[in-house]
Amino acid sequence: MATVLLLRHGRTTANATGELAGRRPVELDDTGRAQAARAGERLRPLPLAAVVTSPLIRCRTTVDLALPGCEPVIDEGLTECGYGDWEGRPLKELAKEPLWPVVQQHPSAAVFPNGEAMAAMSARAVATIRRWDEQITASHGPDALWLACSHGDVIKAIVADAMGLHLDQFQRIVADPASISVIRYTPARPFLVRLNDTSDLASLIPPPSQDGARSDAAVGGGAGGGV
């Protein structure tokens, strides 16, 4: 099946001030815009079959800056977790809330006041990615590469699912602004090819002989490049 590149949006004004942005229309700051441009330098050599993005402005701007002229598909399934009453509040203040330890240690049980459950966020994000991956595989073949631009907790939940981790372990994963994590799905299992990556991506382009549907892990580690 196809390979998805999970791009987190660049740094925002809320990231810079330590606030929880949530679903508010928070913009990229100057650092975030530069991060998005640098991500584009890594992405543009890749033959991306499709680009899908969260509807929030910080993701759409990141895609616009990284891939000028691209017309991404907007999918609500990739939107930020609904943090409800937590949105817009400083993280240092939220850390004093009784719910904070639950979010950190047992996120599968966390439900934000007037917001979304983290388990529900994980389920709809994973379902969205897997649906798109199946569609792109069907239309472009198993060697296709495609991009999904989303948010930190959303990407962490998708990666945790690919690694077979319970959602309660997803806080062990890091997804920095403008980083790229890469998952190659196969009929037997997903492979986590890159995590929180900011380096060159050219090795993701499959050679002509690659069997994109191969499900076996490379015993001994393989030759690199996800083959």
Image (tube, rainbow, N blue to C red):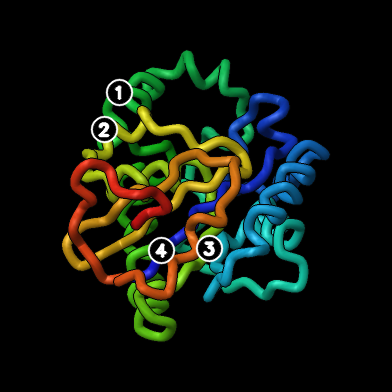
Q: Secondary structure at mark 2?
A: helix
Report the residue marked by disc 4: 3
Dividing the picture into quadrants, the one containing residue 51 is bottom right
Quote the CA–CA distance across marks 2 and 1.
Answer: 6 Å
Is residue 121 or residue 51 the one in the foreground?
51
Q: Secondary structure at mark 1?
A: helix
Answer whether labels 2 and 1 touch (C-beta < 8 Å).
Answer: yes
Report the residue marked by disc 2: 168
Which image quadrant: the N terminus? bottom left
Does the rendering let one see residue 131? Answer: no
Disc nearer the start of the sequence (2/1)? 1
Q: Position of residue 48 (x, y in %)?
A: 56, 70
Q: Secondary structure at mark 4?
A: strand
131 left or right of 166? right
164 over 215 or under it: above or below: above
Disc nearer the start of the sequence (1/4)? 4
Disc nearer the start of the sequence (1/3)? 1
| Three-letter amino acid code at the position of disc 4 | Thr
Q: Position of residue 165 (x, y in %)?
A: 23, 40
Is residue 19 or residue 142 the one in the foreground?
142
Q: Secondary structure at mark 3?
A: strand
Q: In percent of the image, x 74 and y 36: which residue is there?
A: 13
Instruction: State the mark number for residue 147.
Output: 3
Quote the CA–CA distance across marks 1 and 3.
Answer: 30 Å
Report the residue marked by disc 1: 105
| Three-letter amino acid code at the position of disc 1 | Gln
| Three-letter amino acid code at the position of disc 2 | Asp
Callout in the foreground (1, 4):
4
Q: Position of residue 160 (x, y in %)?
A: 31, 43
73 left or right of 184? right
